[in-house]
Image (cartoon, rainbow, N blue to C red):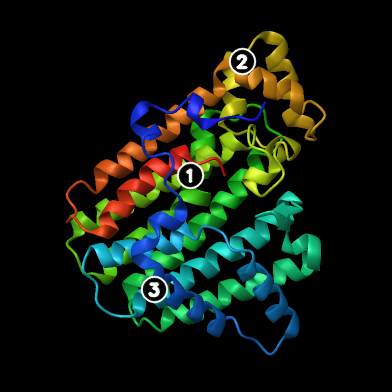
């Protein structure tokens, strides 16, 4: 039976569970269009294959939440200018480059409901175009002519790379505990959320405490999103997720639902999970899925995501009221109530 988030959400979240990404982005629709224009202009290349893959990726859509965070925080904190469009495009290029490389490393074949770039164009092309996106992102960030901005983005890119390596080291290792798992999330996923939110505050030239609050929001909302992604991998259908459910198990990736089962399941369940992580593949997916549901692993993972979302919400409690701040608050609920 597919997982239904309504089984686990508290009443507070259920009241707003119908919030959609489109509704959340209403205050920045014009900004998002401007960012799309920047991306299309900056990803133009004389090399045909780069143009083809870039258009393929842009056409795939996606929530573009990191981009949205930068725009939301810049607007919420009173920025008036156009560099937020440029830097949001930089963030999107960095994120897209990580996806291209991720899909090659993970041997993924489906993302956002269609074939991954590596499945369509091949691994070599995906890796090289990912490199192009990274280098183009650094060309673009120089245009802001601000060493603080360059420091934030270069540091974030380096930490993300460290997170990728940490995740690789954790693959097929059933002894990964919750702390190691969360470290990968903080590095690999949450860091770019954090950087995007911080950049919005930096552009608005707010005081350090408010900049740190924006960064804290980004860090914790990014962690909440990844926790729910990892939960949905053991619950949602491919149609809901836009990728193959059960991919984490196939890759031998120990995420929180599995870690919980390893620590709290019956001896036979723990033995099966250890073997599945060590060997990878989907042979035991149905059996492990049933054990995860019976063990309370989904409840535990959801509760962890809710705690992260609440920390994010608290971080912006002192922000001035505006449609942008309200969308940031609603994003906290959406991050744990979504089913895709």
Residue 161: which quarter of the image?
Answer: bottom right
User: Residue, x 73% and y 40% (percent of image)?
Assistant: 251
User: Residue, x 42% and y 46% (percent of image)?
Assistant: 19
- Separation of residues labelled 3 and 2 (CA atoms): 46 Å
**Front of the two marks 1 and 3:** 3
Q: Is residue 15 left or right of residue 320?
A: right
Query: Residue tagged by mark 1?
Result: 225
Nearer to the camera, 138 or 36? 36
Query: Residue tagged by mark 2?
Result: 294
Residue 60 lies, with reference to residue 79, above or below; the image says above
Residue 277 % position (x, y): 72, 30
Specify few, some or many for label 3: CA neighbours under 10 Å numbering under 14, 14-19, or 20 or more: few
Quadrant assignment for the C terminus: top right
Say what secondary structure mark 1 lies in. Answer: helix
Query: Residue tagged by mark 3?
Result: 30
- Separation of residues labelled 2 and 1 (CA atoms): 23 Å
Say what secondary structure mark 3 lies in. Answer: helix
First in sequence, mark 1 or 3: give its number. Answer: 3
Residue 259 % position (x, y): 59, 26
Specify few, some or many for label 1: CA neighbours under 10 Å numbering under 14, 14-19, or 20 or more: many
User: Residue, x 68% and y 9% (percent of image)?
Assistant: 267
Residue 60 visible here: yes
Q: Is residue 68 left or right of residue 211?
A: right
Residue 151 lies, with reference to residue 9, above or below; the image says below
């Amino acid at each position: 039976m597919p997982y239904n988030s309504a089984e686990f959400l508290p009443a507070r979240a259920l009241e707003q569970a119908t919030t959609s990404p489109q509704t959340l982005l209403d205050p920045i629709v014009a900004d998002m269009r401007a960012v799309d224009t920047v991306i299309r202009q900056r990803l133009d290349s004389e090399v045909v294959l780069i143009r083809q893959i870039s258009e393929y990726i842009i056409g795939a859509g996606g929530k573009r939440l990191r981009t949205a965070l930068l725009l939301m925080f810049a607007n919420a904190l009173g920025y008036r200018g156009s560099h937020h469009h440029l830097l949001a495009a930089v963030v999107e290029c960095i994120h897209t480059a990580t996806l291209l490389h991720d899909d090659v490393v993970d041997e993924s074949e489906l993302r956002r409901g269609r074939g991954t770039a590596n499945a369509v164009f091949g691994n070599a092309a995906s890796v090289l175009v990912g490199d192009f996106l990274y280098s183009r992102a650094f060309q673009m960030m120089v245009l802001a002519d601000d060493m603080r901005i360059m420091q934030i983005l270069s540091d974030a890119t380096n930490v993300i790379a460290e997170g990728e390596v940490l995740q690789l080291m954790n693959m097929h290792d059933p002894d990964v505990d919750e702390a190691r798992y969360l470290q990968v999330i903080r590095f690999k996923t949450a860091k770019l959320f954090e950087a995007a939110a911080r950049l919005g505050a930096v552009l608005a030239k707010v005081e350090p405490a408010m900049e740190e609050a924006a960064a804290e929001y980004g860090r914790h909302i990014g962690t909440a999103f990844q926790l729910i992604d990892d939960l949905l991998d053991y619950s949602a259908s491919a149609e809901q997720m836009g990728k193959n459910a059960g991919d984490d198990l196939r890759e031998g990736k120990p995420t929180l639902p599995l870690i919980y089962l390893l620590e709290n399941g019956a001896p036979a369940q723990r033995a099966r999970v250890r073997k599945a992580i060590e060997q990878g593949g989907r042979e035991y997916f149905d059996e492990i899925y049933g054990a995860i549901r019976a063990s309370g692993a989904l409840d535990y993972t959801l509760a962890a995501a809710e705690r992260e979302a609440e920390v994010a919400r608290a971080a912006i409690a002192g922000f001035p009221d505006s449609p942008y701040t309200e969308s940031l608050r609603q994003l906290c609920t959406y991050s744990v109530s979504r089913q895709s």
